[in-house]
């Protein structure tokens, strides 16, 4: 059952536009990070305070049907706001290309986090630089099919 409610687009124009292109093309356009050619997924979640529907593009880090959500925000010193949304309500929809499925997010720690962090850096090497400069431990969630 897809998440329902009033969609509130991102205040960041490039993010908002990527979501619009991705969804309107059924994942055939806007599915990579600008000119990197690296694949992106769209995670739909519920705002922790507004209760509105939020849609967050993230780098695609997939392993055997499960995905990582890496709260890197380009290495900014603070977690992205969507981190608090997933902590408040872990039920999300993930769109990967044309496929959309209900998933549940679980924040990772310890060895499991290390394993997924390796997968994330392999998929998107700049994550390693972001961790260097962030002065916070970048949280990683695993998204598992319901
Ligand atoms: C700007 C802010 O965004 P944010 O949630 O901090 O997330 C920042 C970024 O992580 C987000 O824009 C990502 O999509 C950026 N981004 C990636 N961000 C990442 O962290 N990791 C990635 O791998 C990643 C990849 C990526 C690929 C393509 C692309 O276009 C963007 C990509 C935002 O949307 N703020 C809203 C509020 C959003 C929100 O969720 N509000 C909650 C309240 C939450 C609270 O305050 O507790 C609510 O509605 O209730 C606002 O200021 O109005």
Image (cartoon, grey):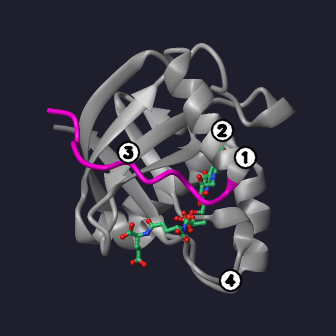
Name the residue tied to disc 1: 14
Q: Nearer the viewer, mark 1 or mark 4?
A: 1
Q: Residue at x 32, y 69 (%)?
A: 50
For label 1, being within 8 Å of ligand 1 is answered: yes
Do tag 2 and tag 4 residues touch (Cβ < 8 Å)? no
Name the residue tied to disc 2: 17
Q: Residue at x 46, y 26 (%)?
A: 96
Q: CA distance from mark 1 to mark 2?
A: 5 Å
Q: Quadrant of the C terminus?
A: top left
Looking at the picture, how far across and down is residue 134, in whole percent? 71, 79
Is tag 4's residue or tag 3's residue first in the polypeptide sequence? 3
Q: Nearer the viewer, mark 2 or mark 4?
A: 2
Looking at the picture, how far across and down is residue 18, in whole percent? 64, 36
Is tag 2's residue or tag 4's residue first in the polypeptide sequence? 2
Looking at the picture, how far across and down is residue 52, in whole percent? 32, 58
Taking the image in four quarters, ligand 1 sits in the one at: bottom right
Q: CA distance from mark 2 to mark 4?
A: 25 Å
Name the residue tied to disc 4: 77
SS state under label 4: loop
SS state under label 3: strand
Q: Nearer the viewer, residue 126 or 29?
A: 29
Do tag 4 and tag 3 residues touch (Cβ < 8 Å)? no
Is tag 3's residue or tag 1's residue first in the polypeptide sequence? 1
Q: Quadrant of residue 34?
A: top right
């Amino acid at each position: 059952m897809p998440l329902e409610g009033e969609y509130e687009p991102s205040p960041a124009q490039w993010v908002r536009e990527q979501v619009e292109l991705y969804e309107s093309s059924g994942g055939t356009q806007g599915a990579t990070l600008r000119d990197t050619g690296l694949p992106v997924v769209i995670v739909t979640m519920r705002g922790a305070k507004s209760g509105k529907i939020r849609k967050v593009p993230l780098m695609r880090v997939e392993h055997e049907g499960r995905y990582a959500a890496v709260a890197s925000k380009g290495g900014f010193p603070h977690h992205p706001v969507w981190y608090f949304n997933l902590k408040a309500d872990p039920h999300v929809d993930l769109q990967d290309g044309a496929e959309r499925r209900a998933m549940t997010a679980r924040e990772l720690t310890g060895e499991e986090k290390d394993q997924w962090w390796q997968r994330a850096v392999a998929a998107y090497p700049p994550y390693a630089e972001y961790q260097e400069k962030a002065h916070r431990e970048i949280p990683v969630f695993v998204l598992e099919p319901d």
